Image (tube, rainbow, N blue to C red):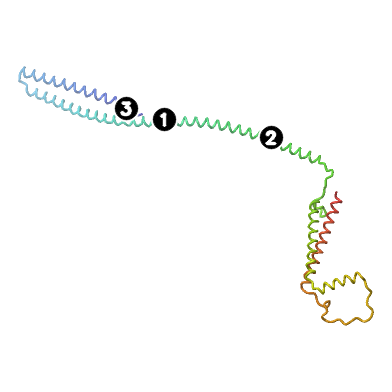
Amino acid sequence: ELEDIEERLREESHELVEMVSRLQDENRKLSSSLAKTEGNHIHSNGATPEIDLKVVTRLQEVIEAQREQLHKTENECHLKATELDNLKSQLEKVNHVNRELRRRQRTNATQMRSLIDERAELQAALQEETRAVTILRQRLGLAQKENEDLASSSTDSLDLTNKLVFDRDDPNRPRFTMTELKEILYERNELKARVSDLEDELEMYRPKDERQDAADDDDDDDDEEPPVQGPMPYEPDDAPWKRGESGIRKFFGFLNTITNRFISDVEDKLLGGVQEGQKTF
């Protein structure tokens, strides 16, 4: 559109220039004809001065009108030229914008082609990865199937010779190994030794009279002497054997009872576990 406008303005300016030149030629012709007419009238006769003045006045009016028209035409030419310059500057700006847009379009087209190529490469890589994943899944399924087959075959061909089989929910199942039994027996022996040491220590803390009475009782039991005949002698109230048991004696007696009971329980459990293990084997 701008090129068409520019072309029309050029044509109009060319027409105006031709019109100006044509008017200038006509002005020159009229001036020369006026000069010739005046010269002829002067040389011929002076009988008709009024007619000559009218002709001259009319010619001058025509010349003035043509001059005014020429000035108008020149002004229009200047305006058209100014408008043409403005249009040229606008056209240059538009051409610059057009070149910039074309450059951007080429850049975008290049980027689009590169993106299309990259997309194609990514799609190819994705297809390769998909195929690889499919192959790996197939291999995994085969491996799982082989593993299940091996597990089932190993379960079917399980050798139970010389093997111990028992129910986990059975309360009477064997719970100790030989090593654990040895450790428990060793601990039991240590406990017995400790109890013996405690008894010796307790014996040390007993009064001498009680120890002597205990020794005499042991001797009497060993000798088994016959009972004494006749009346019994008088026994004083503060006799040692009539005294009540002290707190220390009660404590150690209670400790001894608990220890013996614990040892007997451990021995019963150990014997029961050993017997069950022997039955199982």
Ranked by sequence position, the earlier of labels 3 and 1 is 3
Q: Vertically, is 41 above or below 255?
A: above
Mark 1 and mark 3 in contact (Cβ < 8 Å)?
Answer: no
Residue 178 in picture, x, y percent from top left: 81, 51
Q: Earlier in the sequence, mark 1 or mark 2?
A: 1
Instruction: Identify the amino acid type marked 3.
Output: Glu
Indicate which disc, 2 or 3, sits on the residue closer to the N terminus: 3
Which residue was labeled with disc 2? 139
Disc 3: which residue? 6
Q: Is residue 215 left or right of residue 111?
A: right
Indicate which label's residue lies in the foreground, 3 or 1. Answer: 1
**Residue pictured at 5% horizontal, 18% vertical:** 45
**Residue sitting farthest toward the left:** 46
Residue 240 lies, in percent from the top left, at 82, 77
In the image, what residue type sits under mark 1? Answer: Arg
Point out the frontmost of discs 1 and 2: 2
Q: Quickly name the residue at label 1.
A: 103
Q: Secondary structure at mark 1?
A: helix
Which mark, by number, is residue 112?
none
Q: Are marks 2 and 3 in contact (CB under 8 Å)?
A: no
Where does the image place residue 53, in percent across and percent down from the top left?
9, 24
Residue under the image location 58 percent in, 32 percent down:
125
Mark 2–mark 3 distance (CA, rounded to whole Å): 77 Å
Relative vertical location of residue 175 with respect to residue 47 in this rendering, above or below: below
Residue 250: name its quadrant: bottom right
Crowd class of label 1 (few under 14; some 14 to 19; many from 20; radius 10 Å): few
> Can you tell which quarter of the image residue 172 is in?
bottom right
Q: Residue at x 41, y 30 (%)?
A: 103
